[in-house]
Image (cartoon, helix red, strand yellow):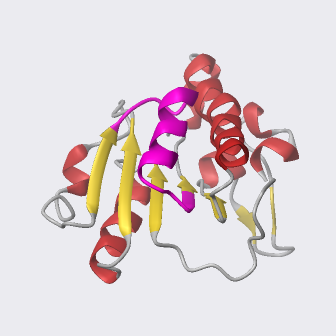
Amino acid sequence: MVPDMGSHTPKNILIVGAAGFIASNVANKLVRSYPDYKMVVFDELDYCSNMKNLIPSKPSPNFKFVKGDIGSADLVNYLLITETIDTIMHCATQTHVDNSFGNSFEFTKNIIYGTPVLLEARKVTGQIRKFSQVSTDEVYGETDEDNNSSRVVSKFCSTPNICL
């Protein structure tokens, strides 16, 4: 059973894709602003991530880095349980969506396989109160200011159940 996500104050946050541009800035801000919250940052460290992005957070006692693959259900479940994670911020994706047309497996692994691994881990552990997925215009497309809608750029996000 999935817990009610109504009123929830996060205490132990897993940030997936944390060495990427967006997630590293979020992680650094959260580590600094909420010293009582534990930030477990998780990243595969591929071409679109960089540990240097997390240098401001490394000395903080509420910061922990774990190198790993989002597709490893065993590792994800282990992290959720051992770190008593109650909140997931899923920011893992590949940048430069044009690369998806030549190397679709990497994009598929993170977006189409990795997301369900996280969602299944949420269901199995029963302890996640909040799950957020974050991406960029490279996946969702730029916002049309006239009607406030967006178009999907990547063929891997053409299914609303996957990316919305």
Q: Position of residue 64 (x, y in %)?
A: 28, 53
Q: Position of residue 10 (x, y in %)?
A: 52, 73
Please state if 36 lies on the left or on the right of 157 as rendered: left
Residue toward you, 20 or 97: 20
Residue toward you, 104 or 51: 51
Please state if 158 lies on the left or on the right of 47 as rendered: right
Give the magenta part as a residue range: 67-88
Residue displayed at 19% across by 66% down = 61
Q: Hey, which residue is sitting farthest left in the picture?
A: 59
Residue displayed at 70% across by 52% down = 141
Please state if 54 lies on the left or on the right of 40 as rendered: left
Residue toward you, 68 or 105: 68
Q: Is residue 94 visible?
A: no
Q: Position of residue 162 (x, y in %)?
A: 79, 42
Query: How many numbered circles does the render carry?
Result: 0
Residue toward you, 116 or 82: 82
Placement of 107 over or under 32, stated as above or below: above
Q: Is residue 106 visible?
A: yes
Q: Is residue 135 inside the magenta stretch?
A: no
Q: Position of residue 116 (x, y in %)?
A: 71, 37
Locate residue 22: give its quadrant: bottom left
Placement of 82 over or under 31, stated as above or below: above
Locate residue 137: give its quadrant: bottom right
Residue displayed at 36% across by 30% down = 46
Placement of 64 over or under 114, stated as above or below: below
Please state if 87 lies on the left or on the right of 37 as rendered: right
Residue displayed at 46% across by 72% down = 11
